[in-house]
Image: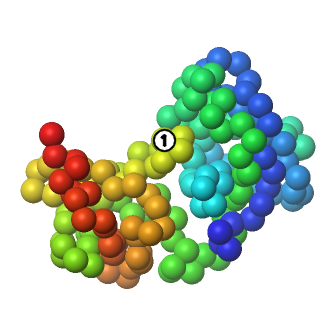
Amino acid sequence: MTSLTYLGFVKKTHGYKGEILITLDADNHTFTKKKPLFLEIAGKGVPFFMESLKDSGSELLVKFEYINSFEEAKEIIGLRVYSEKSGRSESETAYTEIEGYDIVDKDLGNIGKVKGILYKPGQNLIEAVFENKNYFIPMVAEFILKVDTKKNILHTHLPEGLMDANEP
């Protein structure tokens, strides 16, 4: 998480529609809904995009996309919150920018294209399409070898059987 700057933590839920209150421990940050905040989940910075944002200086009132209930918001209480450092290198490209990239697996070769990212509490997923079939790849560092922004390729090393697990 060297490409991220620590901001604070998720303090509590706010209301019943999935809003949360973030206590800021860092100063001098500008927030915009266009840039995600990152929550530390299992030691990794996972991007969450905001539907709404209210900044009071020492706290943020945030509604994240795909967190739509009090119960879902409760799951992220206590998580550490980060923002992206400016001046990212190619290897630090955010996963939000990989839509349309080819997916090339170390063992399987070309396995499709990135259709999008599904942001879920606890486990975000890369939605991919191959031969007119959708499948999902968990966004974990062990599966993603490299993001090549020059060639628009996501290099992976998926465990045996993962592609078969997506079959109906």
Quadrant of the rendered structure where residue 130 is? Answer: bottom left
Q: Is residue 103 above or below residue 37?
A: below
**Secondary structure under the numbered disc 1 in the rendered image:** loop
Whether residue 45 is visible to the viewer of this picture, yes or no, is no
Count of marks overlaid on the render: 1
Q: Is residue 8 left or right of residue 137?
A: right
Q: Could you tell whether 155 is left or right of 63 in the image?
A: left
Whether residue 16 is visible here, answered yes or no, is: yes
Q: How is the image coloured?
A: rainbow
Q: Quadrant of residue 6?
A: bottom right
* Towards the viewer: 79 or 5: 79
x, y percent for residue 43? 63, 60
Say few, some or many: other residues with alpha carbon within 10 Å of mark 1 (under 14 / 14 to 19 / 20 or more): some
Q: Which residue is mark 1?
A: 120
Quadrant that contains the C terminus: top left
Q: Which residue is the extreme one toward the top?
A: 16
Residue at 41% of width from left, 45% of height from top? 118
Image coords of residue 92 (percent x, y): 55, 74
Above or below — where is 82 with respect to 2? above
Residue 105 quadrant: bottom left
Q: Give how far across and how far down residue 136 sits, in percent.
A: 30, 51
